[in-house]
Amino acid sequence: MKIYIFILATLISGCSGIKNLNSKLYNTVPKEYESIKMKVSGTNGFLPGRNISFGDYSAKKIKRSAIVEIQNEYPTRKSSFTQRHVNGMSAKVSFKEEFDEIIDIDQVSRLRLTIRGDIILENEEWEFYNIDYSGDLLATNSNGEQIWIYEVNGGYDFVVDEKIVAGFAKDVNQGAWKSLTDFAWIIEGLSPKKKLILASLITTTIYYE
């Protein structure tokens, strides 16, 4: 299993370099969401990822394990946090990342990522997982409601009934001599519960992104 950890470390190191390179692309917030965008705090600076907040939403009680290696099993990492709104509503979020090995068509070994988790809000529970080991996710509840999360250049679109209802943009250029900034947005007209679920999913994508 140590070889998987080595490959994973190499992969993360390589992704970090790509991330820095891509930050030069200066992603943007679509014009139609400029009026409702919320600055994301806690992703950079001192002890990044300890507390994530945007607008009236904040993630507290953040726990994230180290990547765990167990004999004859693939590496895993567990994360959990409480998503809160200033009105007192909160949701408990937990998810697990699992890294396993596949052999591609060229007989090259590489890692793939599986993500699965849940969101609990009062008497409502949502489950989410990534699609075909990609960065795209699907969240569902017992009523059959669905939220699709699509990875796009520099962020994510959150889609309900084929309509974008929320989003996240990373490393947005705010102009000359200003640092790159992350933004999130959630459209108006949704119930407070649905907005909190979307905020929970936004924070989740920020964590595993």
Image (cartoon, helix red, strand yellow):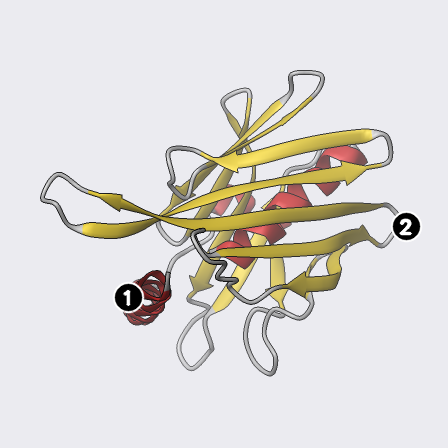
Q: In which quadrant will I find the N terminus?
A: bottom left
Between circles 1 and 2, the one closer to the viewer is: 1
Per the rendering, the mark at residue 80 is none
Per the rendering, the mark at residue 18 is 1
Residue 62 found in image quarter: bottom right
- Compare marks 1 and 2 and give the one earlier in the sequence: 1
Q: Position of residue 56 (x, y in %)?
A: 77, 55
Give the residue type at disc 2: Gly
Q: Is residue 190 visible?
A: no
Taking 132 as reference, is 75 left or right?
right
198 vs 80: above or below: above
Residue in the image at 54% along x and 57% along y: 77
Residue that mark 2 sits on: 88
Q: Position of residue 128 (x, y in %)?
A: 58, 35
Residue in the image at 60% along x and 55% along y: 78
Q: Which structural element holds mark 2?
A: loop
